[in-house]
Image (spheres, rainbow, N blue to C red):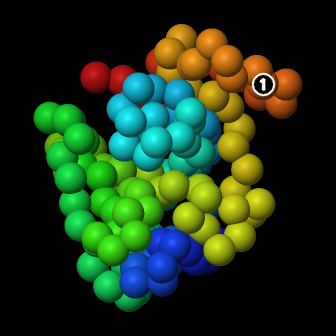
Amino acid sequence: MQLQGGCYCGRIRYEADGEPFDRCCCHCTMCRRTTGAPFVAWFTVRRAEFRFTKGEPARFASSARGLRSFCPTCGTQLTFQYADDSDEIDVTTASLDDPEAVAPLDHIYSDTMLSWIKLDDGLPRRADGYRRD
């Protein structure tokens, strides 16, 4: 499977090959604050299966554990990587050209979900994320 996407203004483009996994909606406070959204849809691919094909994103260490990339022009958040050089990269689902191709399969960090979010999608909810330290 090849997925393509990029930022709102078109300055940054990417491609992801392989089968996406850890397809989720994240409700953690950090994702909310870095995007200004009530939650963020993500999918994960192997780092070797992901590449920027146009432009170079800016990067921001949102914590000691994570590095986020975004377009320096329009601000679209594109990826999240663990600082420990994990072989995985998380990609914002809504930055895909066809976000319908990678629907979320669950909600993570649901214990921090905003009280005014009322979901009726039937997807499982997890109080934690996928990563185990």
Q: Where 121 sits versus 85, above or below?
A: above
Q: Where 74 sits versus 45, above or below?
A: below
Q: Which residue is mark 1?
A: 119
Q: Residue at x 40, y 70 (%)?
A: 74
Which corner quadrant of the image does residue 32 belong to?
A: top left
Residue 47 appears in view: no
Q: Where 22 sits versus 10, above or below?
A: above
Q: Is residue 70 left or right of residue 4?
A: left
Q: Residue at x 37, y 43 (%)?
A: 34
Q: Secondary structure at mark 1?
A: loop
Q: Residues within 10 Å of mark 1 (few under 14, many from 20)?
A: few
Residue 72 appears in view: yes
Q: Position of residue 21 (x, y in %)?
A: 58, 48
Q: Is residue 80 left or right of residue 16?
A: left
Quadrant of the snapshot with the N terminus: bottom right
Q: Position of residue 107 (x, y in %)?
A: 63, 28
Which corner quadrant of the image does residue 17 belong to?
A: bottom right
Q: Where 33 sits versus 97, above or below?
A: above
Quadrant of the snapshot with the C terminus: top left
Q: Position of residue 8 (x, y in %)?
A: 52, 73
Residue type, mark 1 in image? Leu
Q: Residue at x 18, y 46 (%)?
A: 61
State the residue lying farthest toward the bottom. Answer: 54
Q: Residue at x 67, y 18 (%)?
A: 116
